[in-house]
């Protein structure tokens, strides 16, 4: 039972599931790696009376086929016990309801000694020594879960202090993602607060919904056995448009590709993510696509939900609909790459490079009609035109495609010019082109009139418009 495969952070999330199912609005996680190390989880939920607490400590305390309340995050009646004992040898649960405080304990050393599953009832003196017990006393109701005896955590570690601290760092990141919707207040659902050693856990939104460049595609609803499944696709901005903070929220430079796919939520709790369920392959050009899938706990059996609530697979009745959605959103994700950075409202952007599909693949050629190239030709003597052509040809043949692909695959971010320097550089470039084409020439006037639709000016159309107005009156 201890080898089911819980990670420390997944086990902790399972305990918090129980708190949320008990209508807790606050969950406090405390840990101490010193003396007798412990991890304690205190909530202000409804709590349990003594008989209910005894029943909750039973393995398999609920039938997974029994209908549950809509907000219940449990299923098998195993999470509290298997999650806890996968991390420690001693699990103590104290709970308060209707003014009654009681505590029960599973101690694996005692079980091994007696060769029997003997649940221990803690005395008032033993309860008084539990961490956070005074805070539970001050609450009208709630439950306290305490882990002690970290044999597996200490195995192979030179310092349990460092090991527990590292696990808690991972747990904070995990909880911030898994419960990000639970931690966010909405008109329909008030937020639940989660804190670790009194430091609040901040929600991490994998869809970057606050970023103006994120595309929220129209959601679609499916019905499976009279239960609604809502599918809401999102296309993240290109990496060049992400701030360092947004990139971290998206999974970091390495995680952007790995974290594409479906994000399955059960009652707003994230169950699984980063997979297309083998309905499509993960590709570089689809890594910006992420799909929020909301299911109810009444469809657990169809989604093959495991005990850890960390793995799912969609039922056949839904897979075809998901395939169609994948096709639509991956096209949008690819367009972000193909046309990234182009903010012009017209498709008639003068690109610096021409991409042409040929029989054996694609070719990339410098656009000979680009104003920069035309200005270059106008500024050199006729006998030097051949040199210009040779320079362009060498640049086309020497494009480091392999290195560019490797950088894009590893999410190496391109260096960008600071905004102030970028504006000055664009103005200088526009002035040089205009002087070469002739301020009063037809070519020069045409250049200024279409400046916002010419790369690289099209990447910042507002600045391009200001430059065009300035040079027109200059």
Image (cartoon, helix red, strand yellow):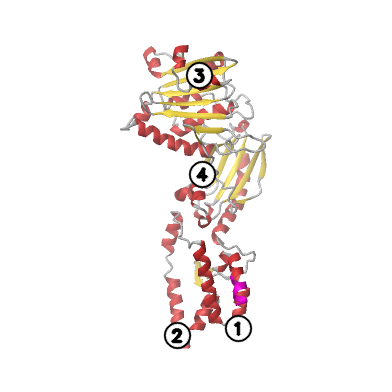
Name the residue furthest left.
Answer: 158
Report the Cα–Cα distance between label 3 and label 4: 37 Å
Q: Secondary structure at mark 3?
A: strand
In percent of width and height, residue 21 lies at 58, 27
In percent of width and height, residue 37 lies at 39, 26
Residue wearing tag 1: 441
248 or 429, nearer to the observer: 429
**Label 4, residues with CA under 10 Å away: few <14, some 14-19, many ≥20:** some
230 or 172, nearer to the observer: 172
Residue ID at (42%, 58%): 406
- Asked if the residue under mark 4 is in contact with the one under mark 2, i.e. CB atoms within 8 Å, the reply is no
Residue wearing tag 2: 384
Dot placed on the residue nearer the N-terminal end, 1 or 4: 4
Q: Is residue 453 visible?
A: no
- Asked if the residue under mark 4 is in contact with the one under mark 3, i.e. CB atoms within 8 Å, the reply is no
Dot placed on the residue nearer the N-terminal end, 3 or 1: 3
Dot placed on the residue nearer the N-terminal end, 2 or 3: 3
Q: Which disc is residue 94 wearing?
A: 3
Name the residue furthest front.
Answer: 474
Report the predominant secondary structure element of the magenta stretch.
helix
Mark 2 or mark 1, whichever is nearer to me: 1
In percent of width and height, residue 4 lies at 44, 29
Q: Quadrant of residue 271?
A: top right
Report the Cα–Cα distance between label 3 and label 1: 85 Å
Specify the segment rendered in magenta. Answer: 467-474
Residue 284 part of the magenta-drawn span: no
């Amino acid at each position: 039972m201890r080898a089911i495969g819980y990670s420390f952070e997944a086990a902790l999330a399972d305990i918090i599931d129980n708190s949320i199912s008990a209508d807790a609005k606050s969950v406090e996680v405390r840990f101490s790696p010193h003396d007798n190390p412990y991890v304690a989880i205190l909530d202000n939920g409804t709590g349990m009376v003594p008989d209910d607490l005894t029943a909750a400590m039973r393995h398999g305390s609920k039938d997974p086929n029994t209908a549950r309340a809509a907000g219940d995050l449990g299923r098998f009646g195993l999470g509290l016990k298997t999650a806890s004992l996968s991390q420690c040898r001693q699990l103590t649960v104290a709970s308060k309801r209707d003014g009654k405080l009681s505590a029960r304990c599973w101690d694996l050393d005692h079980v091994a000694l007696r060769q029997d599953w003997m649940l221990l009832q803690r005395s008032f003196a033993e309860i008084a020594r539990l961490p956070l017990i005074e805070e539970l006393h001050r609450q009208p109701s709630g439950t306290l879960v305490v882990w002690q005896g970290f044999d597996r955590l200490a195995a192979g570690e030179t310092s349990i202090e460092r090991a527990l601290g590292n696990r808690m760092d991972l747990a904070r990141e995990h909880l911030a993602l898994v419960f990000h919707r639970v931690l966010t207040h909405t008109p329909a659902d008030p937020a639940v607060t989660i804190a670790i050693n009194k430091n609040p856990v901040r929600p991490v939104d994998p869809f970057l919904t606050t970023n103006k460049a994120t595309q929220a595609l129209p959601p679609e609803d499916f019905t499976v056995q009279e239960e609604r499944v809502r599918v809401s696709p999102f296309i993240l901005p290109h990496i060049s448009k992400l701030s360092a903070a947004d990139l971290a929220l998206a999974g970091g430079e390495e995680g952007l590709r790995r974290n594409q796919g479906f994000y399955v939520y059960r009652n707003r709790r994230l169950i699984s993510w980063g997979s297309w369920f083998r309905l499509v392959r993960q590709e570089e050009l689809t890594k910006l696509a992420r799909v929020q899938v909301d299911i109810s706990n009444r469809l657990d059996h169809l989604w093959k939900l495991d005990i850890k609530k960390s793995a799912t697979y969609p039922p056949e009745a839904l897979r075809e609909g998901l395939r169609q959605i994948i096709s639509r959103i991956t096209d949008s994700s690819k367009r972000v790459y193909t046309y990234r950075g182009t903010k012009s409202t017209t498709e008639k952007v003068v690109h610096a490079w021409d991409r042409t599909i040929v029989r054996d693949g694609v070719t990339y050629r410098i656009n000979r009609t680009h104003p920069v190239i035309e200005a270059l030709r106008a500024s050199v003597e006729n006998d030097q035109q051949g040199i210009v052509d040779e320079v362009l040809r060498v640049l086309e043949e020497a494009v480091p495609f392999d290195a560019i692909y490797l950088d894009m695959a590893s999410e190496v971010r391109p260096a960008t010019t600071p905004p102030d320097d970028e504006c000055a550089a664009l103005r200088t470039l526009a002035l040089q082109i205009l002087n070469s084409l002739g301020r009063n020439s037809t070519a020069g006037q045409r250049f200024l009139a279409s400046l916002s639709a010419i790369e690289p000016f099209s990447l910042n159309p507002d600045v391009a418009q200001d430059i065009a107005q300035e040079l027109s009156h200059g």
